[in-house]
Amino acid sequence: MGLKKIDLLPAVDIKDGLAVRLNKSNIDSIKDYGQPSEVINDFIAAGAKWIHLVDINAAFRSGNNREMIKELIRKIQIPIQLSGGIADQDALDSALSTSAKRINLATSSLLDIEWVKKVLSAHGDRISVSLDVSNEVLIARGSGEVLGNVFDFLSILNDVGCKRYVVTDNSADGALTGPNLNLIQKILERTDASIIASGGVGKISDIDDLRHLGVEGVIVGQALYVGAVDLNAALDACSE
């Protein structure tokens, strides 16, 4: 029996209405790539079947791009995983009002674990929870809030039936240095939920490694923008 196919989710981060990339989640190390609609259309034309769409302003608490994002999602014909600063009811309501297939709660949402439990109960499989990790400690990439040991939170979330986690190694995000396979493996061993791996992919073999671990999908950002990874080759690595 062959390897299970996994999803490839090209990342499109939006700040001040433009598609941007951050290096190691550093808001001071940023490059813009023009209109998000053009970047998304290029990914779709190249064969992308998903888009991971992130509101960077919302994540860093410097406003939001909600209206643009609603309009983008309305026009996009492939599934969207929407992320970035979704940590309270207002942000969630805005996300739910779009046709995004999946909505990714921010790591900082776990500061109100009772609210997260209610959201998971109400919206089930449409909700994923972001786990931004530095040395096995949850540290929200946008706000910088330190929450505690990732496995403590994982246990709580497993108990309330979280179906999917988006796991990011903060130190690897945007760095092209390879995903943190050890972290992903440890999380896979401690949950039956689906795992979307994010951060660090810099070459095709990184996708192969993640696929062998058994993740559901992989978010790729920086590597696609700087040409370190070809999207068609990456899609092939996810399905061949």
Image (cartoon, rainbow, N blue to C red):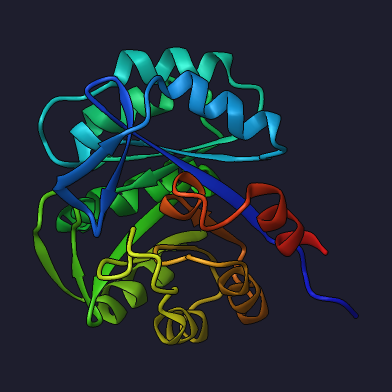
Q: Position of residue 14 (x, y in %)?
A: 32, 30
Q: Is residue 96 left or right of residue 125?
A: left
The N terminus: image quadrant? bottom right
Position of residue 59 relative to residue 131, above or below, is above
Task: Looking at this view, name the residue that lies furthest to the front.
Answer: 227
Position of residue 104 relative to residue 219, above or below, is above
Q: Is residue 125 left or right of residue 56?
A: right
Position of residue 97 relative to residue 152, above or below, is above
Q: Is residue 210 left or right of residue 18?
A: right
Position of residue 2 relative to residue 62, above or below, is below
Q: Is residue 209 left or right of residue 175?
A: right
Viewer can see residue 148: yes
Q: Position of residue 43 (x, y in %)?
A: 60, 34
The C terminus: image quadrant? bottom right
Foreground residue, 4 or 158?
Answer: 4
Q: Residue at x 37, y 30 (%)?
A: 33
Foreground residue, 68 or 30?
Answer: 30
Looking at the image, how many numbered discs can be counted on the residues? 0
Q: Position of residue 98 (x, y in %)?
A: 46, 21
Q: Residue at x 13, y 25 (%)?
A: 63
Q: Residue at x 78, y 60 (%)?
A: 239
Rendered image quadrant of residue 75 = top right
Q: Position of residue 221 (x, y in %)?
A: 44, 50
Task: Looking at this view, name the residue that lies furthest to the right.
Answer: 1
Viewer can see residue 88: no
Q: Residue at x 28, y 72 (%)?
A: 153
